[in-house]
Image (cartoon, grey):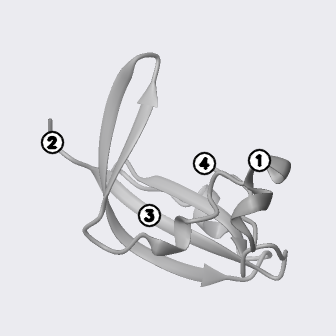
């Protein structure tokens, strides 16, 4: 999932910056994703900052389900990308 970030909370609606607090997530935090009325729970496993050219994580092959959240870093710029990875929590 991709979304904008911003450097100021008052710009969230202006830029549709739903990931403006993504940087606060840490390993072991829980993420809830709602889709078609159903809740899917994930646990953060890793976060990192990468170059915008580093896109191999989008095409990597894996046998395990992984949620990847991406936004620009630092907030309000396009210099780098902040990635948060999470795995499903058994329900």
Reply above or below: 25 against 58: below
Measured Cα–Cα span from mark 4 to mark 3 = 10 Å
Residue 24 x/y as whole percent: 46, 73
Q: Which label sits on residue 31? A: none
**Which residue is denoted by mark 4 in the rendering?**
1
Secondary structure beneath label 1: helix
- Nearest the viewer among 14 and 2 is 14
Residue 30 x/y as whole percent: 29, 56
Q: Is residue 67 left or right of residue 2?
A: left
**Which residue is denoted by mark 1 in the rendering?**
13
Secondary structure beneath label 3: strand
The earlier-in-sequence mark between 2 and 3 is 3
Measured Cα–Cα span from mark 4 to mark 2 = 21 Å
Q: Quadrant of the C terminus?
A: top left
Secondary structure beneath label 4: loop
**Which residue is denoted by mark 2 in the rendering?**
90
Q: How many marks?
A: 4
Q: Nearer the viewer, mark 1 or mark 4?
A: 1
**Which residue is denoted by mark 3 in the rendering?**
85
Q: Nearer the viewer, mark 1 or mark 3?
A: 1
Q: Is residue 14 left or right of residue 2?
A: right
Residue 9 x/y as whole percent: 69, 64
Q: Residues within 10 Å of mark 3 (few under 14, many from 20)?
A: some
Residue 35 x/y as whole percent: 46, 25
The earlier-in-sequence mark between 4 and 3 is 4
Reply above or below: 34 against 82: above
Asked which quadrant contains residue 51, the reply is bottom right
Residue at (73% x, 75% y) in the render: 75
The earlier-in-sequence mark between 1 and 4 is 4
Q: Residues within 10 Å of mark 2 (few under 14, many from 20)?
A: few
């Amino acid at each position: 999932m991709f979304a904008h970030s911003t450097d100021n909370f008052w710009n969230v609606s202006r830029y549709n910056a739903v990931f403006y607090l993504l940087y606060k997530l840490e390993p072991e935090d829980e993420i809830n994703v709602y889709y078609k009325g159903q809740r899917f729970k994930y646990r953060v496993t890793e976060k990192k900052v990468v170059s915008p050219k580093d896109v191999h994580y989008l095409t990597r092959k894996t046998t395990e389900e992984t949620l990847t959240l991406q936004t620009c870093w630092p907030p309000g710029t396009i210099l780098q990308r902040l990635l948060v990875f999470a795995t499903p929590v058994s329900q």
